[in-house]
Amino acid sequence: MKVLAPLVPYLLIGLGLWYVLNLRGMKYFRQAMYGSGDLMNQAWTGLATMGQDEPTDGSMTHEVFPATLGLRAVSTALVTLLMVLLCPYPILSDGVPFVGRFAIEEYVLAWVIAGYYLFWIHTYKVEIHGHWLIYRNFWMMTRKLDLRRLEDVEDNRQYSLVLFFDDGKRGEVFKTVRGSLKLKRKLVRWLEINTRL
């Protein structure tokens, strides 16, 4: 129990952050308490999709769909909570504080990975420029896909759309982008145009 005692304030801070960031949380909490849904799934989904219907930046030929504020907030909160929980606390060994030799190095590595992930989430965007769909995958490689070759859009995943092209290419973009309904409509329009040809 002595080892867990230092974690209590951090857990309380994490729960407080969750409550503050969860603007729709009470609605989902009531639904979960009274039998109409899974609390965590609905709460995080509701938060991550917050801001999907906001207007996008761009013109008729070039539109930008950045990650929603909710997705960025949830990712930041979860990574912060995880990093606080992973913090290498001294472990008591016969009354003498002891930190493992590699604990600090592993913690620094975890921070580097977390920073990379947060940078990717905070800079994520999907662009439609003319007939090109442009986005950056997790490895920071810019993917440029020709929408004239779009063959199918699979929308059965919770957070992403999978795009299939007739030349064998495949793309996966987040649904949790600002203006996602407009993005879906544009993709469906390209599918209709391609099936007519």
Image (tube, helix red, strand yellow):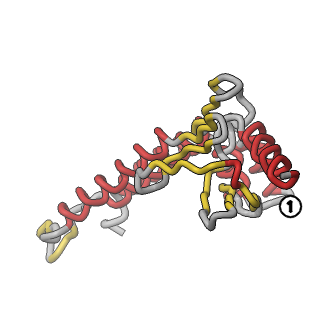
Which residue shows up at 30% across the image and 53% down it? 111
Query: Residue 68 appears at what percent x and percent y?
Result: 61, 38
Which residue shows up at 60% across the image and 32% down it? 64
Which residue shows up at 34% across the image and 61% down it? 86
Task: Decide: is 42 above or below 61.
Answer: below
Q: Is residue 82 visible?
A: yes
Q: Secondary structure at mark 1?
A: loop
Q: Which residue is mark 1?
A: 35
Instruction: Please tell me which residue lies in front, 48 or 61.
Output: 61
Which amino acid, by three-letter code, is at mark 1? Gly
Instruction: Please tell me which residue lies in front, 137 or 32.
Output: 137
Query: Residue 106 appears at what percent x and percent y?
Result: 24, 64
Residue occupying the far top of the picture: 59
Image quadrant in which you'd find residue 62: top right
Query: Residue 187 appears at what percent x and percent y?
Result: 75, 46
Q: Is residue 165 left or right of residue 115?
A: right
Task: Determine crowd level at label 1: few under 14, some 14-19, many 20+ residues with C-alpha closer than 10 A.
Answer: few
